[in-house]
Image: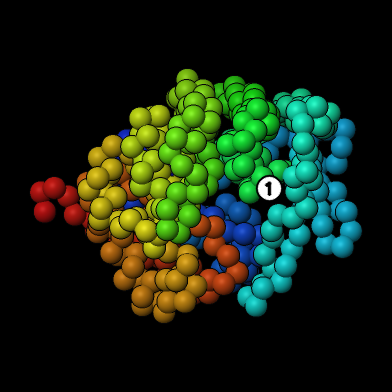
Amino acid sequence: MVMTSKKRVMCAIGLETPDRIPLDFGANPATLERLKNNLQVSGHADLLKALHVDIVDLRGVVDPVYVGPVPKVRDLGQGVKENFWGMRTTVKQSITGPEEMYCDFILQKAESLEELEAYRWPEVDWFDFSDFKNRLRCWQDFAVMASGVSIWQHATFLRSLDVLLMDLISRPEIGEYLIDKFTNFYLTYFDKMFSEANGMIDILRIADDIGMQNGLLIGPNIFIKFLAPRIKKFVDMAHSYGIKVMFHSCGSIVPLIDKLIEMEIDILDPLQVTAKDMDPQFLKNTFGHRICLHGSIDTQYILPQGRVEEVIENVKTMIKILGKDGGFILAPSHVLQTDVPMENVIAMYETGFKFGDKFPTSGT
């Protein structure tokens, strides 16, 4: 029996076997526009349907209306923009297209709690949720995902990664103050969103990179002491609304996966299978019966550099390994960037759709 996208995704999250492997999607703005042009579609829903995608990420698609006293984004000149948090970005031209990156970390040199307390922190009432539910109605064919929670990575965009890492060791009161500012804001923000949505959101995505290519970015003790208790608050809050939780971290994070499962994370993203110890068969055998696995299609080598035939074979391999007995959502291992050829993107999704029901079960 053919499932709806929502049912298919929720079945996989429940570690059950859906009618086919669900597909998810993410791309940076330039790649998004290229795909729309290539597939000759205009709206975001039409793009997702053309790629057979089952999940819609609400961020940038359906957002609460910003009504804050400072601009949501302002142009500082010389190519630098600043958002309402004070995070600054610039766009650099790579050989394949434009890529946005963070710069000018404005709280990097703060030396005291008093300096941080004097900073103009945003408030949740800067956002109007009054019409949010009505604008969600047209997306109910998809599994609906709210994203944007980040208590660690977003803090680094104000403080810088190296300084915040040192704070947690030498000045933990400063590090914790910053992390708590994001924790408290996002807890209130998403609690309000879920209340207003009234059952129309299925997944909360938390994104806090804790891994590098060859190991952890932060030690297990630091994660357990500073991040885990705060992340658990989001898990408990989302679950209180019947919403599943996805945790995103790039890199090699095997030593912390058991802890994430203990924290009742439902979905592990993105399975960066080229990172150390992130072998897909190992991940499936070790964790696949306890947490839904999401991602796996390599954006470092296979998608940007591989031939279409290699992409097709890679997708089939991941379906065979990770799709066994369900509990798997196929997606790129990172947002698609401008170095990925359009034919490889299309091959990934067409293969995922065509072969998504051809996964082994325990009886085969």
What is the x, y in percent for residue 205? 52, 39
Q: Is residue 231 visible?
A: no
What is the x, y in percent for residue 201? 52, 33
Q: Quadrant of residue 152?
A: top right
87 with respect to 351 (left or right):
right
Q: Is residue 281 visible?
A: yes
Q: Check the image and name the residue furthest to the left.
A: 363
Per the image, the residue denoted by label 1 is 160
What is the x, y in percent for residue 4? 40, 43
159 with respect to 328 (left or right):
right
Question: The residue under label 1 is which amino acid type?
Answer: Ser
Q: Nearer the viewer, residue 59 or 187?
A: 187
Please state, as top left, top right, bottom left or bottom right, where the C terminus lies in the image.
Answer: bottom left
- SS under mark 1: loop
Picture layout, residue 96 above or below residue 270? below
Q: Quadrant of residue 134?
A: top right
